[in-house]
Amino acid sequence: MTQPILELRNLTRHFDVGTGGMFSARRGLVRAVEDVSLTLEHGQTLALVGESGCGKTTLARMLLRLLPPTSGQVLVDGQDVATLLGSTLRAFRTKVQAVFQDPWASLSPRMKVFDIVAETLVVNERLTKGELTRRVDEALTSVGLRPEQARLYPHEFSGGQRQRIAIASAIIARPKLMILDEPVSALDVSIRSQIMNLFKDIQTEYGCSYVIVAHDLGTTRYMADRIAVMYLGRLVEVAPTDEIFDLPRHPYTEALLSAALPLRPRKDRAEAIQLSGEVPSPMNPPSGCAFHPRCHRVIDGRCSSDIPVSQSIGPAHRVACHLYSG
Amino acid sequence: MTPTPDPPVLNVVNLRTELVFGAHRVEVVRDVSFSVMRGETLGIVGESGSGKSMTALSIMQVLPRPIGRIHSGEIWLDGRNLVGLSEDQMTTVRGREIGMILQDPHTSLNPVYTVGNQLVEALRLNRTAESRTLKKRAIALLKRVNVADAERRFHAYPHQMSGGMKQRVVGAISLAGAPKVIIADEPTTALDVTIQLQYLQLLEDIQRDTGTAIVFITHDLGIVARLCHRLVVMYAGRIVEEGTVADVFDAPSHPYTTALLNSVPHVDRKVDRLYAIAGQPPTLNEIGEGCSFAPRCPHADDLCRTTRPPRDPGKSGSTDHFASCWKLRDIA
């Protein structure tokens, strides 16, 4: 078996926070990401799914080495990213790229498109001016922009075009792994499908892998090969996309999917599972399975006392729930 | 509750709204007409720049000042035309007759007052309760929108609540005046999916209990399918299609509606490749004389580009389904 492009081993991140107001010495611990293990194969797309506060953005930031883990490891191409230094770190910075949600915030308004797109190469590789121009032209063409638009500033573009610029600046270094954090949610509905199709075309052309963070379940169904569902910092279920959508096993996945609104008038639709209450604070998660207070299939006793262990229930399908632990 | 055959509680007729920049004026709502019955939910669907929010602001007459103004048209609320009312008169309409819920619950509440304080203020302004019962009424409203532990939450500040709970409080404030119509402008966009579903359910419950009409503005067709009875689809300031949710979803008749439905990824089935509408929505000063969608439409010809299409019966054959497209009968 070849080495996966990405492997997470028991990845954990805690944040120290004050709890008693601005001047209080009382401290608390937010367990933003707790013991997450995952792998992603070359050329595949993994989606991280969950509600606000589930830790998906913290996880994405650790993948980019923007945030060190409290414990556990992120391995890209078999290398622990925490150990990278100097030239290996520079290589990592070209190998892994990111596209963020808001193309109004992620592009510097004072730089021309050429400089924005070329930046990764200027910082990390030594190229001649001619070579640099050729690569920028190529990147812009790949994302459906014209090379002469490199002379313009970001404010001269629409939202969809700006996101294309952000994508060009990510693919120019020919990354092997791209982290897409809500890459279409700031765009208009009619523009979203253009950009999603563009990501798919780029993947076919360059063979890169994606980790996509998205709250829209339709987007993840369309984009991802595998889905990882998170709840309060923990991974509750991982499986191939079709399996998750057609036969979700964890009660939270079930409820999350049934809360999605299909494009059909309500007359011909199953009743959704309504979760009671809201996601609890990650500072004070419930005992046992963190989902048990809202779960519609809770088992008395066990769920509130023991943390469920993640186990395989099929090829590439893992779930952390007492319903499946014999 | 099912819509009743009474006259509509809200009837917008040939509304035109414009933004004036010195000598330059841009029409943002172009000849828009629709009506909403008591107990009915109407969805207004469109992308940014479609005029959906400007339509809502026109009804409330809270257009951006000083540049926004209603150019012409009528807005009938329960038999009274709101266009031309004085600011003082509109103040009594807002809140008491029309409630409004905006997109972002983090900015629609005042951070320096408790939610109880803000609810009591809304109740007092609407003169719907006597002053000694205000607090009791406010707590009852919080309970009505399913805020748990309402007596304690009455004393909480907005920052002590989650987004979903804040949006419930905004809902409670909009209910304070027992309005005939609630205008909700993307109220669930900032909420998580499971919380969004709870909120939509709450709106349905409130409507069933009070018979209030709801105008729900959104870009999310899934929400429309779940919540609304009828919808209008807006593009570049105009209504391009209108009808019941079943008719429009089963027999979309305007190419823009069809394209929108085809470009949204489904949760309940796998699609290999999404349809992508070429180009982007026009900015409002680039709209020509013909059909606004013509530059992006695969079926457009010279007629479409030069002449505005009439409002014709839609493909479902229902008497309340309309679309404005020259090619309506030609496209399979």
Image: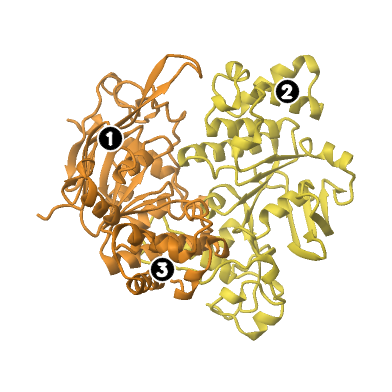
Chain colours: A orange, B yellow
Q: Chain of mark 2?
A: B
Q: Position of residue B276 (x, y in %)?
A: 47, 68
Which of the 4 image quarters holds residue B116?
Answer: top right
- Residue B48 versus residue B84: which sits nearer the camera? B48
Residue type for callout 1? Pro
Marks 1/3: CA distance?
A: 34 Å
Residue type for callout 3? Val
Q: Position of residue A140 (x, y in %)?
A: 41, 70
SS of the residue at dot 3?
loop
Residue B224's place in the image compared with A322, above or below, is below
Q: Work out whether residue A44 can be spotted.
A: yes
- Residue B285 versus residue B313: which sits nearer the camera? B285
Mark 2 or 3, which is nearer the eye?
3
Q: Position of residue B165 (x, y in %)?
A: 55, 30
Specify few, some or many for label 2: CA neighbours under 10 Å numbering under 14, 14-19, or 20 or more. Answer: many
Disc assigned to residue A143: 3
Q: Which residue is mark 2?
A: B120
Q: Which residue is mark 1?
A: A69
